[in-house]
Image (tube, rainbow, N blue to C red):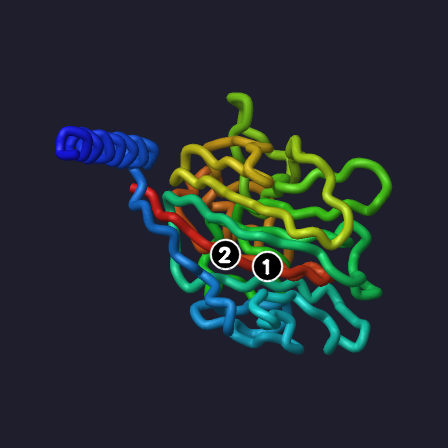
Amino acid sequence: MKQIFYPFIFIMLSFFIFFSYKNKTNVPPDSKNKWIQLFNGKNLDNWVVKIKGHPLGDNYKNTFRVVNGVMQVNYDEYNGIFNASYGHIFYKKEFSNYRMKLQYRFTGKQIKDGAGWAKRNSGVMVHCQAPESMELEQNFPVSIEVQLLGGLNDGERPTGNLCTPGTHIVMNGKLQKNHCFNSSSKTFNGDQWVSLEILVRNDSIISHMINGETVLTYGKPQIGGSVENVDPKVWKSKEGKPLKKGYISLQSESHPVEFKNIEILELN
């Protein structure tokens, strides 16, 4: 028995050491290796709301709320009138180098006076200006927007796109000044949950992933272009300044949407 038992222990230990080493080598060397929940599934603690036409912290008509463990953007208290009340909910601190992931889905119908382009449209804003620096009537924060679109059951409508409110980026080696860029993702119709992951590397590289597939990559985010409902002089003097860090926010643009499992992994 001893002649069989000891080799068995040796083999088992060898397997344990091998797989432990293998798992360690799969961890990125620059990763802190700890995903942090930004949304606790219970309330909006650590988040602050800014809605156009309303002061910071005023969650106008309960636009952002927590229901059954998910963060909802809901317009059932608007009495059918959106009135261009574009909103954002910001996490409380800035980030620079990280991976962020969440799941989202569109639900219900768009509020009646929402813009046509905003149907089944939302976004995750990264490298945002500070929420307290937004002007009262400002539509969108200066940021890089990971645009989220739901299918309209008619043709292709990719998601995980890029829009650039008050910003420019470099793509294919050239400074790009267009406002929006489509990703290579497929179209997602209905109310299915879709997984989004964003890789942000300071002011160098940003990548969008949908359901585990990279659909768009670009770099060198920087301030540039117009900002709606803001004195142009405010940002013109900062044109070309690299965006090295910023806040993260989620949008309300007139179509109900839900978010869950919002997590971040900071990188060195």
- In the picture, the quarter occupied by the C terminus is top left
Identified at 45% across, 59% down, the residue is 130
- Element class at badge 2: strand
- Residue 226, given in percent of the width and then of the height, sits at 60, 46
Q: Nearer the viewer, residue 185 or 117?
A: 185
Residue extending farthest top:
173
- Element class at badge 1: strand
Identified at 55% across, 37% down, the residue is 212
Compared to 76, does 21 lie above or below? above
Residue 262: image tag: 2
Q: Residues within 10 Å of mark 2 (few under 14, many from 20)?
A: many
Q: Nearer the viewer, residue 11 or 72?
A: 11
Question: Which of the 4 quarters of the picture holds residue 51?
Answer: bottom right
Q: Is residue 101 visible?
A: yes
- Residue 198, given in percent of the width and then of the height, sits at 50, 42
Identified at 61% across, 58% down, the residue is 251
Q: CA distance from mark 1 to mark 2?
A: 7 Å
Residue bearing the label numbered 1: 259
Q: Residues within 10 Å of mark 1 (few under 14, many from 20)?
A: many
Is residue 184 left or right of 244 when viewed as pictured? right
Identified at 75% across, 68% down, the residue is 82
